[in-house]
């Protein structure tokens, strides 16, 4: 898999309180491309971070409806990947981001 395709699939790490708690249990969260599949995400994480992926779960989140200057608008939706690594492996998300 080429570096361009990997970087297109894995957009960014998703940093939140929940993702910090999950990182303690070898599970990491990434924002991924809308058309990415579980196999794509698994291959991209394994080649970019040189780790073994056990499981990938994908979640589509809807964008929130917000008002801007008295007009209704909405934020963009995201597709997130929850990636579980093999026991004893870790990713330093802050160094690669």
Image (cartoon, rainbow, N blue to C red):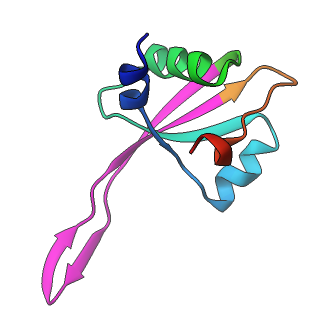
Residue 60, percent from left and from top: 38, 42
**In the image, what residue occupies the spot 14% across and 89% down?**
70
Is 4 located above or below residue 17 in the figure? above
The image quadrant where one finds the C terminus is top right
Q: Quadrant of residue 29?
A: top right
Q: Nearer the viewer, residue 72 or 88?
A: 88
In the rendered image, residue 61 lying in the magenta stretch gets the answer: yes
Main SS category, magenta section: strand
Residue 47, percent from left and from top: 58, 16
Residue 26, percent from left and from top: 77, 34
Would residue 68 be found to the left or right of residue 85 on screen?
left
Q: Quadrant of residue 37?
A: top left
**In the image, what residue occupies the spot 19% across and 83% down?**
68
Is 68 located above or below residue 62 in the figure? below
Find the residue positioned furthest to the bottom: 70
Segment colored magenta: 55-83
Residue 81, percent from left and from top: 51, 35
In the rendered image, residue 65 lying in the magenta stretch gets the answer: yes
Would residue 12 be found to the left or right of residue 91 on screen?
left
Would residue 1 be found to the left or right of residue 85 on screen?
left
Would residue 61 be found to the left or right of residue 50 on screen?
left
**In the image, what residue occupies the spot 43% across and 10% down?**
1
Find the residue positioned furthest to the right: 88
**In the image, what residue occupies the spot 52% across and 14% down?**
43
Is 34 located above or below residue 97 in the figure? above
Find the residue positioned furthest to the top: 1
């Amino acid at each position: 898999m080429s570096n361009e395709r990997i970087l297109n699939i894995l957009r960014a790490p998703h940093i939140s309180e929940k993702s910090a708690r999950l990182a303690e249990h070898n599970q990491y969260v990434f924002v991924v491309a809308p058309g990415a599949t579980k196999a794509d995400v698994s291959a991209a994480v394994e080649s970019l971070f040189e780790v073994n992926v056990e499981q990938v779960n994908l979640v589509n989140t809807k964008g929130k409806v917000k008002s801007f200057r008295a007009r209704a608008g909405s934020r963009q939706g995201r597709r997130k990947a929850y990636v579980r690594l093999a026991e004893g492996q870790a990713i330093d998300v802050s160094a690669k981001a």
